[in-house]
Image (cartoon, rainbow, N blue to C red):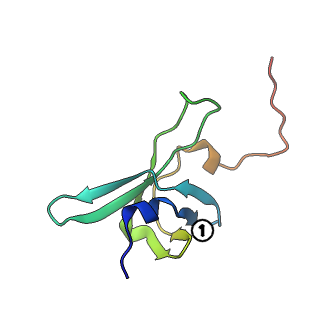
Amino acid sequence: MGCRTRELKEKTVISVCDGRSLGNICDFEVDTCDGRIEAIFVPGCYGGSFWNRGDDIRIPWSCINRIGEDAILVDGDYDHSDCSCCKDQNPRKKRRWF
């Protein structure tokens, strides 16, 4: 069964480690010699404004567990350690604006 890149971009990427949605695919890395997809990218975390966006998260194709009708399940070792939304945060902690 085939799938177009446009259809892949519409699917939500979900981590099977913690069940968290990582967002939709924003880019692909293609091996130009083989013509195969090497990795997918999902948008990095937003730091509160449009200009303060983190780097995209690179997920190797080998980390993709399953591609379903509406979601892509990923598992394995992909680097998202610098992403602030991936770190443990206390949701009850109040922000101080002064």
Residue 79 % position (x, y): 46, 53
Residue at coordinates 73% horizontally, 46% vertically from top-left?
Answer: 89
Question: Which residue, as the protein is rendered here, is positioned at the far left?
Answer: 33
Lateral position of residue 97 relative to residue 81, left or right: right
Frontmost residue, 45 versus 96: 45
**Quarter placement of the C terminus:** top right
Image height of 87 relative to 1, above or below:
above
* Three-letter code, disc 1: Cys
**Residue sitting nearer the eye, 50 or 96:** 50
Give left or right: position of 33 versus 50: left
At which x and y percent is residue 35? Answer: 20, 65
Check disc 1 and report its element: helix, strand or loop: loop
Look at the image and tell me in which quarter the N terminus lies: bottom left
- Identify the residue shown where x is 40% and y is 58%: 40
In percent of width and height, residue 38 lies at 30, 62
**Relative to residue 10, is residue 2 depicted above or below?**
below
| Residue occupied by mark 1 | 17
Indicate left or right for 3 with 48 as reference.
Answer: left
